[in-house]
Image (cartoon, coloured by chain):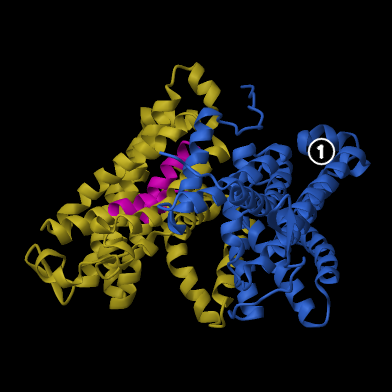
Amino acid sequence: MVFAVDWAGVAQQVVAGLSSGGIYAILAVAFVLIYRATGVVNFAQGELAMFSTFVAWTLTQHGFGYWPAFVVTVLASFAGGIALERVVIRPVERASVLTIAIVTIGLFYVVNGAAFWIWSPEVKSMPNAFSTRPIRIAGVAFSISDLGIIGVSLLTVLVLWLFFRFTKLGLAMRAAALNPESSRLTGIRVSWTIALGWGLATALGAVAGLMAAPPLGSFDQNFMQPILLYAFAGAVLGGIDSALGAVIGSLALGVFLNLLGTYVSWVGTDLRQAAALAVILVVLLVRPAGLFGTTAVTRV
Amino acid sequence: MSRVLRVATGVIIAAAAVALVLVLPHWLSDAKAAEFARAGCFFIAILGLNLVTGYTGQISLGHGALMAVGAYTTAILTADHGFRDLWTIPLAGLVAMAAGFALGLPARRLSGLYLALATFAFAVAMPALLKRFSGLTGGSQGINLFDQALNRSTGALGHVHVLGRSVATNDFLFYLTWGIGLVLAGAAWLLVRGRVGRAFRAVRDSEVAAASAGINTGFYKTLAFGISGFYAGVGGSLFVLVSNWFVSPSTFGFDKSLLLVVGAVVGGLGSLAGMALGALFIQFVPGWAANLSNAPGAPSVFFGAAIVLVMILLPGGLGGLLRKLTEPLTRRL
């Protein structure tokens, strides 16, 4: 049996996979941010990203170009995320992790419903962020949009890394996440670093939503839900406490999903999610803390 | 509080619960009785979830899928194999119990969020699998037992004759679900008071400490999932009966699993009475929310806001409130 492998096709699929993986990666990093700060998975993360995207859509309807709308929305989302944390999460800060998680599930319903309430259920479409022309590299046509999304994702993650690595505020946030008690003693306002984490995570969500929406053509209020699922899976695959792991896990997942969808035809759209999760499960059974996660050592 | 008094309080509470279940349908309209019966199904499933999450400390986002296993067991046995629906309820519990054990296997290695993802995968995969194996499950059309209701099922129309008395169908379903619910709640109470319950709690409070005390943590985690699967399966099986004898893959999407977790935490994990309140919450609050405003999305906003408010005001859930209210009473005993 001879396989004629179409390498150009594989390369195209890998780039397309990296592009969707990049979107998952941004959201996955947002997961990791909030998880490290509070030990909670924010179930509303995807819906907040959706809400930001709709805000940007409204701006584009009022004469804003894509990129001005992008900048305004990301800044507004940052402020909105902080406000949300102060109003909703702050009161349950000392409650159990499960209680906080349920609050985020409540937020999921609120934000999703509010978006339907404000923007009516008709599908929307977003102007393109990048040129829709293909670009030829070494004889293979790639989509500029895919490459642009990969670029924005990597840039976003890089900026975030620089922030956490080289600024005082970033250091304070890392300290607060690692050891809240000691950080408090050194004068860090731990509660505010959590709010800041929510702000950053919501802004990241806005970036993810704004990258994800235009290529879809049309989108409605539920468009972030599958993306949220993959971002969560990517984050856990990489190790939920490792930002680098989350990025690599998400990119790998994006590529894997795309190749699976293209070359394994019996895995229809229905089973794609299930197949991806099953593979992750197998990985987790071999490495129970994810690919790059640290195994927690607990003292009794 | 002495042991005798404690047991006596338990008996009194149980008697009060039984009395309440017996008289309630007399005050309820037919439609309300059906809604309460649905809440009864949630109650049973949440009791199971409480054993896994509340007592053993393992997060499960997959209990909706375990309900699906029970529901489809009942539907398939009744539709294709000529079983009478009532007899399939324990069988549905057993099949879902097997599924629960299988779901519990990853719990031997994974914990926290990693386990949550494993159960999440199960919940997401379930509707897709049900559609895929359409020969057995009827695909996305689902299975409708309503046509068979007259001979094989619990009288879809009119009255049901039990013990020489004639009872309206929805009242019968109410008695059935809450009757089974109370029995299973009693079983759960006995379970968590005993040796197994102590082992569950030890695993929850500290796995390392439990292991060094000689508790086989993997075994107890899997056991919790298995028993909990039985509860979810029974709940799912009854859910078919109260949903007009109909089940389809979309009945048990991921949103059901999420709703069950909401019910358990809003009810107050670790409190059996709280589980009933949690079940009533997820059954009735969405409906009340829809009464407030029917604009698209508005009910969802109110429901979500109710969840957030309950959690902010009562971090221990409704069961925690109940405990606070009854504490002055029980302390004096």
Q: Residue at x 46, y 38 (%)?
A: B55
- Residue A222 quadrant: bottom right
Q: Please, which chain is the residue tagged with disc 1 on?
A: A
Graded by Cα atoms within 10 Å as few (under 14), some (14 to 19) or many (20 or more), the crowding at tag 1 reads: some
- Which of the two residues, A237 or B151, is positioned nearer the viewer here? A237
Asked if the stretch drawn in magenta spans residue B58, the answer is yes
Asked if the stretch drawn in magenta spans residue B46, the answer is yes
- Does the image show residue B11? no
| Residue identified by numbered label 1 | A174
Across and down, in percent, residue B92 comes to 24, 50
Q: Up-down: is B5 above or below B266?
A: above
Residue B172 in the figure: left or right of residue A87: left
- Residue A178 quadrant: top right
- Which of the two residues, B250 or A253, is positioned nearer the viewer here? A253
Q: Secondary structure at mark 1?
A: helix
Q: Colour of chain A?
A: blue
Residue A293 in the figure: left or right of residue B134: right
Q: Residue at x 43, y 56 (%)?
A: A268
Q: Residue at x 76, y 72 (%)?
A: A56
Amino acid of disc 1 = Arg
Highlighted magenta segment, given as a residue range: B43-70
Q: Colour of chain B?
A: yellow
- Which of the two residues, B286 or A218, is positioned nearer the viewer here? A218
Across and down, in percent, residue B327 comes to 51, 47
Residue B12 in the figure: left or right of residue A8: left
- Which of the two residues, A271 or B290, is positioned nearer the viewer here? A271
- Does the image show residue B28? yes
